[in-house]
Each structure stands twice: as C-alpha cells, then as structure tokens.
Amino acid sequence: MKLNLNELAGQFQLEGTVVEVKPLGEGFINDTFIIKTGEGTPNYILQRKNKNIFTNVPAMMENIEKVCAHIKAKVVAAGGDPRREAMTIVPALDGKLHYEDEDQEYWAVCEFIDDTIAYQAAETPELAYAGGKGIGKFQAMVADLTDPLTDILPGFHNIRFRFKQWDEVLAKDPVGRKAELAEEIKWVEERREEMLNFWKLVEDGTIPTRVTHNDTKINNILFDQKGDVLCVIDLDTVLNSTVLNDYGDAMRSYTNTGLEDDENLDNVSMDIEIFKAYTKGYLEETKSFISPSELEYLAFSAKYITYEQVLRFLMDYIDGDNYYKVKSTEHNLVRTKAQYKLLQSMEEQFEQMQAIVKELAS
Ligand code: GN1
Ligand code: MG
C-alpha cells in the first residue's frame, strides 16, 4: 500500500501527534514538507531526498548525523542550545536515519527550528557580515572532525570532473541544443585552463581538504530575531573538500545584485560592499585554522564557483534539463546567462576583491 504524507510522517520517531503535513519552500533538488504537530511538541521537516542525485542516501544521512553530533557537542560545551544551534535528525521507527518507501524513495526527517528568519538575499552588509561569521563558525566547529565523511557526491565541486561530464554531454548533444549555443559554450571553454590550474592545487594538497558544507547560499542559514546566525542547515552536501568552495558559493549567492535566474541582466552584478562584509565576518571566525594558500585563493574561489555554476546550468540545458527543476524550457539558459553576467562582474572587480582579502586578513 502506498503511504500518504501523514503515514510517511508516522514512520519516524516524532514527539506529539501529527496535525498536518504540507509542502514547504522551493528547493531545486529535494521535495520538502513541514510536519505540524500539536501544542508543546516540535514541528518537523520531512524530505524526499532526490535519489537521482543522492545515490547513497543512507551514507548521506550518516554524514549529516556525524557533523550534527560534532557541532552539538561544541554548542553544549559553549553553553548553547543544541536543538536550536544545530540540526537534529529524527530517526525512523527502526532507528535508521532514513525511511525507504515501497517505490524505493528515501525520506528523512529533522526537527523544525522555530522562531527564526531565513533570507532569500543578503540585503545589507550587516546581514552579509553575519552570514560570513555563520559559515566561518560552522567551518571552525568542524575543523577538528578528522574522521573522513563518505564521498556521496564524487567530484561535486571538482571542475575536472565537471569537464568530464561537460565533454560527454556536448559530444552527445541529446536534444540538439548545442548548435545555437556557440557563444555560451565559448564562455566555458575560454576559462577551462584557468579553472583547472586552480583545481590542481587542491589535487596536489597545496590547498587542504576539510569538512565543508558545499551549498552555502544565504537561505541555508537560520538567523535569530536579533539578526545573529543561529544554525547552518541543509547539510545534504557535507563532504571533504576545500573550504574555498563554501566561501566562493556564498559569494556567488550573497553578492549578486539580481536573482540567480534574473531575466534582466542589468540587475545582475557583484556588490563589492557585500563581498567585503561577508569576508570580514568569515575571516574573523576562521583565523584559527585558515592557511596562507587558502587565503591566497579566497577571492579566486568566488569566480571559480560562479564559473562552475555557469557550466552546470548550461550543461543541464544542453542535456535536456535532467538535473535542476525548471519552470520553463529556457530556464537553465536564463540561469546560465545570469550567472555569466555575475562572473564577468567578478572578473572586472577582481583586483579590488583581492585587495580586500589581503587587508582583512592582515
Ligand atoms: C542546488 O537545491 P539547492 O538549492 O539546495 C545544487 C547546488 C547549486 C544550487 C543552485 C546537490 O542546491 O549545488 O549551487 O542548486 N545542489 C546540488 O542554486 O546539486
Ligand atoms: Mg542544497
């Protein structure tokens, strides 16, 4: 028998009685629901994890639990509230961290943290500063988590791996979109060497590998009512990689004066004040562990991740929109163009970005 959402919620060790389960948010990857329970008991987040992308959900959930447990111990030691300042994964009735339904879909639950604010954009430098502190603090808390995580997304922010996918998709051109895209493809190809040269430094260990979040958009941070960072959420992509990817991805999303999929490219540019504020907060929290090689490439990482996103959106468009959820047939192309505009804006301001990092790190 196929379970409905309420019955699925019933497969987890929840406190209280389920009142309703309804959709929440608009993630590109998973399907997300909120489980409301009665007075005095927590609400929960129920997610169907996208099994096409996360091919090993049990290992993903183990990674998440490891990171959460590590952070909770730090929060407790600092006198904080581990149920508000860290995510709490709720096991299924059989004790596993996921529930597999009869269609082999994977479901997971965590506690919903009440009374928080999530932002879709870093509207002010103050907010960007707080976000930088939040991600910096997250990285500092997991810096001593040396037990390796399972690599559930091989090659996730690895441009060498992305080029392999890119070359395959372009060779196939499965829906015949390539012919129209000579200019956009050139944007990617022109920068191939530059990006690979950076990644070589990660491969040869010049830039160290640590526990990283890998999806540091501002809406993956919960703020409290005072505007301080409470908790970093959406840990699906916690992996061992370079912290530069977390910094770079945050800069890609925070500094954009437009939308990730803005149709009006005039709206899109990099806001250097937001860049500066985030970097200040980030460096304040990471000075205890960040290395000279990481500092040297910090500003570059903003270009790297934005470039990678240009490639990923364009590749998905050429591939016929199999990865990202799309709202129209052109959506991935619109996203590609908007991210490319942002990349160009970063390239124009690169010297200033480097000067800011240098000044704030000294
Ligand atoms: C995806 O679904 P969401 O918004 O958490 C993607 C990120 C991209 C982002 C683009 C697992 O994240 O890498 O940067 O879309 N996550 C995965 O907005 O591919
Ligand atoms: Mg995500």
Image: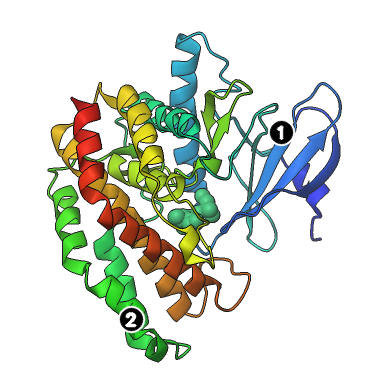
Estimate how packed mark 1 is, as few (under 14), some (14 to 19) or many (20 or more) residues with alpha carbons within 10 Å. some
* Horizontal side of residue 248 vs 48, given as left or right: left
Give the secondary structure at mark 1: loop
Residue to which mark 2 is pinned = 183
Closer to the camera, 289 or 91? 289
Give the secondary structure at mark 2: helix
Where is residue 260 shown, x and y percent of the image?
50, 58
Q: Residue at x 27, y 51 (%)?
A: 349
* Horizontal side of residue 206 vs 96, given as left or right: left
Residue 248 drawn above or below residue 327: above
What's the amino acid at mark 1? Answer: Gln
Closer to the camera, 217 or 147? 217
Residue 17 drawn above or below residue 56: above
Residue 181 drawn above or below residue 257: below
Where is residue 181 shown, x and y percent of the image?
38, 84
Q: Residue at x 52, y 75 (%)?
A: 321
Residue 187: name its quadrant: bottom left
* Real-space Cα separation, disc 1 to disc 2, in angstroms: 53 Å
